[in-house]
Image (spheres, rainbow, N blue to C red):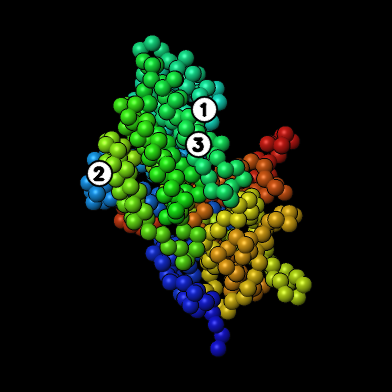
């Protein structure tokens, strides 16, 4: 009996999941036929499914609301979107429909903030949390927001010089609210044990007492905590959170204006069909630990801020490619060549071996085979195999008479910015066309072309030939 690709998936995973389903032998993502996109736009293509963004935000808000209610937490919760995960205007517009705030990381982010305000999508009393190392241009742009009457701009101080420069830029009647970022201690697997960002644990209280306490125009409002491994239910995470709370309590006892704890981002997103993470439990445990620690040390509970980026937009994105050709190598390896490049279009798969959900878009009733996936560039690293994938890659058998399309899902965070969207990429691989998918009021879906595939003329102009 021939074993079909559907049988393989059905035996290996709990399929279909909420996002995925089948219409005969073709894949649906949120009930949207992926082959319809292929037939309308061709490949390669990337898409952004905007309703997923609002869904993720509302889920996180509900988890924090339920947790705070359950433990009788007195502080408030504020959801900030980490813009660096995806700066695209449709993404920001969708996210801001959900009464959220903004976290920035560069000077040009501030220009986006100003445009969102001028378009009526963001208000001047929304929180704008300014993170990252701040160049003079970044500091000047932050100061321009304050001069323009933005009420809740919170630059998170990364080093002591930033505060001096910001203070010097204030007009006499202006007030500045700041945060301080903790230079967290990372897991030993990282090349550097202490984060390059922020101020060391032992230096934070002295910094406040020496630089902030006597400054009439500056108030410390927020303590910022983030670790690279993100929010995980591990002994390491809880240990670092406890150390952070220790700093918060010490700081609060000498700084009455401190009212907010920012726990950053780092919620994981699905990278395979067998992904399992109890978000609600994790949120409840964080809220409970903050409340318990503050009660034990007799300090008020802080307002909680998060800066979810990948969690907000990651699961909204996908990419679809066509298998152009199969190259048998060494009598045992089968390389399926896609009509694009992993290095340029999904750079995290190459740079950090990041896993994505990968599934065929059509031919689910065909027999399957184990393959490797190769990109179009001449670089030996332009591939996607079991090192990046959760296990070996199986796809419907290659047949020159029957086109095969594959999709990578949950790719909506960072891939365009890391890959250099619209610029020059390895072997002059063009950026694929970008499709925006939205829902109508009656629940039906619609798509539109956000950007066409990058043209030769665009590349020649960038390279100075035109």
Q: Residues within 10 Å of mark 3 (few under 14, many from 20)?
A: many
Q: Residue at x 71, y 37 (%)?
A: 463
Name the secondary structure under disc 3.
Answer: loop
Q: CA distance from mark 2 to mark 3?
A: 27 Å
Name the secondary structure under disc 1.
Answer: loop
**In this rendering, position of residue 270 left or right of residue 149:** right
Name the secondary structure under disc 2.
Answer: loop
Q: How many marks?
A: 3
Can you identify the residue that label 2 sits on? Answer: 73
Position above or below: 280 against 128: below
Can you identify the residue that label 1 sits on? Answer: 159
Q: Residue at x 47, y 32 (%)?
A: 202
- Which quarter of the figure is the C terminus placed in? top right
N-terminal of the two: label 3 or label 1?
A: 1
Q: CA distance from mark 3 to mark 1?
A: 10 Å
Can you identify the residue that label 3 sits on? Answer: 183
Counting from the top left corner in percent of width and height, residue 86 is at: 49, 43
The answer to whether the residue labelled 3 contacts the one labelled 1, judged by CB atoms less than 8 Å apart, is no
Counting from the top left corner in percent of width and height, residue 347 is at: 61, 50
Q: Residues within 10 Å of mark 2 (few under 14, many from 20)?
A: some
């Amino acid at each position: 009996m021939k074993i079909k690709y559907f049988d393989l998936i059905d035996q290996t995973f709990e399929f279909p999941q909420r996002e995925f389903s089948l219409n005969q032998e073709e894949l649906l993502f949120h009930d949207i036929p992926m082959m319809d996109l292929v037939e309308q736009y061709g490949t390669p293509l990337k898409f952004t499914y905007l309703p997923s963004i609002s869904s993720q935000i509302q889920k996180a808000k509900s988890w924090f609301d339920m947790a705070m209610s359950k433990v009788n937490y007195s502080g408030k919760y504020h959801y900030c979107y980490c813009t660096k995960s995806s700066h695209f205007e449709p993404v920001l517009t969708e996210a801001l429909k959900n009464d959220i705030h903004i976290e920035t990381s560069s000077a040009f982010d501030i220009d986006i903030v100003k445009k969102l305000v001028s378009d009526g999508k963001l208000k001047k009393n929304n929180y704008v949390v300014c993170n990252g190392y701040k160049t003079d241009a970044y500091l000047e742009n932050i100061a321009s927001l304050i001069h323009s009457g933005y009420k809740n701009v919170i630059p998170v101080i990364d080093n002591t010089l930033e505060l001096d420069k910001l203070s010097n830029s204030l007009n006499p009647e202006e007030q500045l609210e700041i945060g301080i970022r903790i230079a967290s201690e990372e897991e030993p697997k990282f090349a550097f044990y202490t984060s390059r960002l922020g101020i060391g644990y032992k230096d934070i209280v002295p910094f406040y007492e020496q630089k902030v306490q006597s400054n009439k125009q500056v108030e410390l409002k927020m303590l910022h905590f983030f670790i690279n491994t993100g929010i995980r239910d591990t002994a390491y995470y809880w240990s670092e959170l406890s150390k952070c709370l220790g700093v918060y309590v010490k700081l609060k006892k000498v700084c009455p204006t401190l009212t907010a704890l920012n726990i950053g981002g780092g919620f994981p997103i699905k990278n395979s069909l067998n992904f399992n993470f109890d978000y609600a439990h994790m949120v409840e445990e964080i809220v409970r630990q903050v409340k318990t620690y503050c009660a034990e040390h007799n300090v008020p509970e802080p307002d909680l801020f998060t800066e979810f980026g990948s969690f907000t937009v990651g699961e909204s994105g996908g990419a679809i490619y066509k298998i152009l050709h199969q190259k048998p190598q060494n009598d045992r390896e089968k390389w399926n060549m896609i009509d694009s490049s992993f290095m340029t279009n999904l750079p995290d798969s190459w740079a950090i071996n990041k896993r994505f959900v990968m599934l065929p878009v059509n031919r689910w009733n065909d027999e399957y085979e184990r393959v490797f996936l190769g990109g179009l560039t001449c670089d030996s690293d332009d591939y996607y195999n079991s090192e990046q994938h959760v296990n070996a890659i199986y796809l419907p058998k290659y047949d020159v008479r029957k086109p095969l399309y594959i999709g990578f899902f949950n790719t909506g965070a960072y891939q365009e910015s890391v890959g250099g969207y619209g610029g020059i990429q390895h072997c002059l691989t063009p950026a694929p066309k970008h499709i925006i998918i939205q829902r109508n009021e009656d629940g039906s879906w619609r798509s539109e072309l956000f950007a066409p595939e990058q043209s030769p003329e665009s590349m020649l102009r960038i390279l100075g030939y035109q």
